[in-house]
Amino acid sequence: MSTTAASPVRRPNSSSVSWRLSDRLGLGLAWVLGLLFCAIAAAIVIYFLVEGIRYLRPNLLVTNPAAASSESQTGGFLDPLLGTVILGTMAMAIAVPVGVGIAVWLSEFGRPTGLARVAESAVEMLAGEPSVVLALFGAILFTVPALGFLSQTTHGVVLGQSFFAAAALLSLVGLPLVVASTREGLQAIPSHVREASYAVGKTKIATTRRVLLPAARPSMLTGTMLGLGRVISDTAIVLLLLGGTLTFQAANSTPVLGLLRGTGDTLTGYIYYNAPTGDGNQPSKAYAAAFVLMLFVLALNLGVDVVLGRSRTAVTWK
Amino acid sequence: MKKPPPVRRLTGNEGYAPRAFVAPAPPPRALGAADANGNGHRPSPAFAAPSSRAARGAAMAIDRMQVEELSVTYGSKPAVKSVSLPIRQGEVLALIGPSGCGKTTLLRSLNRLTELTRGASASGRITLDGVDIATMEPTALRRRVTMVFQQPNPFPMSVFDNVAYVLREQASRRPRRAAVRGAVRDALARAGLLDEVADNLDHPALRLSGGQQQRLCIARALAADPEVLLLDEPCSALDPQSTRLIEELIIKLREDVAIVIVTHNLQQAYRIADCVAFMYLGELVEYGSAHKMFGSPREKRTRDYVGGAFG
């Protein structure tokens, strides 16, 4: 055929009929697994979409959980919803500056070399750490009397459960994603751009602040959103360190500090409690809350796609 | 010791307007903000270091930098071997030679950018207006010996901010926009870019065309009001039209700043250079006026390279 010879772009064996058997089996397996995962993801989303729309009532978003015998009397999940927002904000307020700092240090300075390598593996280890282990560690840490001012003390015993404690440990959940993404963004900047800044007499710090970090901003944003997605999805730390008390139980009457030193809950904790196999066993409430949480996470993922898509089409260096 | 021969300014061997035989005026010191950068006390550029050549006639260029017995090695690999040459204001010095011959390393040694490469070590001496650059603060040196790179690399900010970035101090208090506006426009004008971008100073610099980006990089390098401008193959990523603009710009600029350009393009060296240094395997094979280097080179290797026999 003259056409195949004339178009070198076209791959010679674009039809799998002529492939070897093992290749054809591999291709088939890839298709089956790919479709299977798509089906699972779609099933989860569709199931909670249907259930969520069925059970989600506007008043669930503005009323607090209440103790009652009938499911229609147990209120909504205002406090858990606010808890998710507060805890996510606090955790990322710690994770982003620290994570960006670590990424800049690892990518731009990397000295002392030994310490940088250790820090690098520490962050990687953190990424693979089960959050319940982190929560356990936090429970030990924040019950130390010296840290009692961050939570409540009753009868001389430090409770160790508060927004501060939970946010501190949750920041470790978000941190590796911020570090990885920011580092990737910094490393994508060609070295001659750094040198161009040094070559007009700028210091390394000025270069990092004025040139490199602005250039890596889309990556930082991506890392922040991915980290936030992980943080608001976490349950173990919320249950062990925030108390999982369904409503806010302020430590004292001080406006903000009292709330943050007290216990509370998030959507994940609320779902855990109300799941059909949980203590509360109010599936309709759990579905509605799960639907709201899922919308949060989907919105974050969409945000990541938008940022990445925009930075892909953005003009940049060769 | 090969002390390079004195070089005479040339006329008539290039395709551009004839060059005037005038003593280079002291570089304009109009950049108000730049004076606050600690460079204000540099020696008066034109006559502070009178060489015997400068005394002999107005047609001579002024020595700005002197490279003496410079050797640079990366690890154990020598990149530049005992090179000596002068760099003068009022003329364009082109470094030519095949890839890997050390010309870019030599260029980067002039503002101590080689130090940023891990494993690089240098011996020998480079002076700027008589002062050993090894004794200077690298940031101060690099404001006086600025550099433009092969790939246009404006910073991810507006056209204005790209130039203002250079004028602003590292300190926490940054001068206001109005305080640097004049100097920014001046630098853009010197790089021949002002007319094209005057209405779009706030547009992202990375949206400019490649040639405009490169002239912006030249403006950025000029904003520091340097004595020496280093150009590392500045046109190799550009189209012929942009190349022509930049070459014209280089010829115009050489009266104010000493210019060193690395180029792979022999035609380009022929078009714009007053002096040419041919390097091969880290050695300076031959240094001389462009006229002599292209017309009657002394060394066989130069003849072969210029004639296209290798490289």
Image (cartoon, helix red, strand yellow):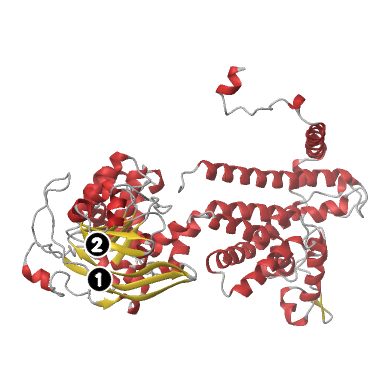
Residue type pointed to by label 2: Tyr
The chain holding disc 1 is: B
Image side of residue A171 versus residue A197, left or right:
right
Image side of residue B229 versus residue A171, left or right:
left
Q: Seen from this angle, which residue lies furthest top?
A: A1
Q: Quadrant of residue A193?
A: bottom left
Q: Quadrant of residue A82?
A: bottom right
Q: CA distance from mark 1 to mark 2?
A: 10 Å
Question: Dot 2: few (<14), some (14–19), or many (≥20) neighbours within 10 Å?
Answer: many
Circle 1 is placed at which residue position?
B2
Residues A218 and A251: in front is A218
Circle 2 is placed at which residue position?
B287
Q: Position of residue B205 (x, y in %)?
A: 38, 48
Do the CB atoms of the residues marked 1 and 2 lie less than 8 Å apart?
yes
Image side of residue A287 versus residue B289, left or right:
right
Q: Position of residue B139 (x, y in %)?
A: 36, 71
Question: Dot 1: few (<14), some (14–19), or many (≥20) neighbours within 10 Å?
Answer: few
